[in-house]
Image (tube, grey):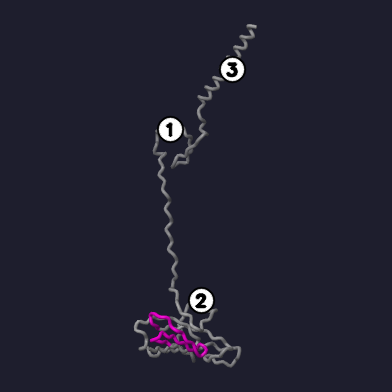
Amino acid sequence: MKKLLAYMLVTALLAVSAEVSVAKSKQKTPVPPEVGYFYVPGTQEVVSHEVEARLQKEQPELLTVSFQAPDAPPAEPLPYPQEPTSVYSDGPALSSGMSAAPMQLYHCVEVEDRHNIHPCAVTKIVSVLDPCPPACGSCGGCDSCNSCGTCCPRGCVFVQICVPPCGCPEVKVSRHGSKVKYDYGEYEVEITSDDGVVKVDYDD
């Protein structure tokens, strides 16, 4: 009986001693370096937090990083048209299918009564019927500088006129569009398109 009690006591003491040893070993076991890493700025080295703490004491300049936002690329200027956009008024003969080709003024223009132009006039580009349309092939009896009436549609040309600086004109069209009058009240501009010539007549 005494031997059994002694055996049980020794077994219990050994078990307690083993638990104490395990607890102490857990307390003394260092934290593995895999737990955390730290990247050293300016190098390609990755170290544990233990090495980081040592570097903080020995070489603190390695761990000082100054962050600066990258310079933004210079803003590119907005593209501007190489040539100014032409502004013209829609005359009565302006075709809806006209192409976007550069505008050219008609070459044969006669001006009458220039002295009747408004003293502060501004220039304005308007469209009128082509005074010399190409020969019509559908009817075969048209002259290159005579209107074919309704059988052959005529194109248009652009001319520059001088008009008063303000006010909205009353536009009057006659002779199937070959004669256009811009009435500004005290001043008028009459444009006639016929026989290969565009005539501009100023009245006051």
- Residue 189: x and y in percent read 42, 87
Q: Nearer the viewer, residue 116 or 77?
A: 116
First in sequence: mark 2 vs mark 1: 1
CA separation, marks 2 and 3? 101 Å
Relative to 27, is 118 above or below? below
Residue lying furthest left: 119
Q: Nearer the viewer, residue 7 or 46?
A: 7
Say which amino acid is labelled 2: Ala
Residue beneath disc 2: 100
Relative to 87, is 25 above or below? above
* Mark 2 touches mark 1? (CB < 8 Å): no
| Secondary structure under the numbered disc 1 in the rendered image | helix
The quarter holding residue 141 reads: bottom right
Name which residue lies at 37% across and 86% down: 117
Which residues lie in the magenta part? 162-189
Comparing labels 1 and 3, the label whose residue is closer to the camera: 3
- Is the C terminus in the top left, top right, bottom left or bottom right quadrant? bottom left
In this image, 77 relative to 153: left or right? left
Name which residue lies at 48% across and 34% down: 48
CA separation, marks 2 and 1? 75 Å
Crowd around label 1: few <14 · some 14–19 · many ≥20 (10 Å): few
* Mark 1 touches mark 3? (CB < 8 Å): no
CA separation, marks 1 and 3? 40 Å
Residue beneath disc 1: 54
Q: Nearer the viewer, residue 101 or 41?
A: 101
Residue beneath disc 3: 15
Residue lying furthest front: 185
Say which amino acid is labelled 1: Arg
- Residue 156: x and y in percent read 50, 84
* Mark 2 touches mark 3? (CB < 8 Å): no
| Secondary structure under the numbered disc 2 in the rendered image | loop
Comparing labels 2 and 1, the label whose residue is closer to the camera: 2
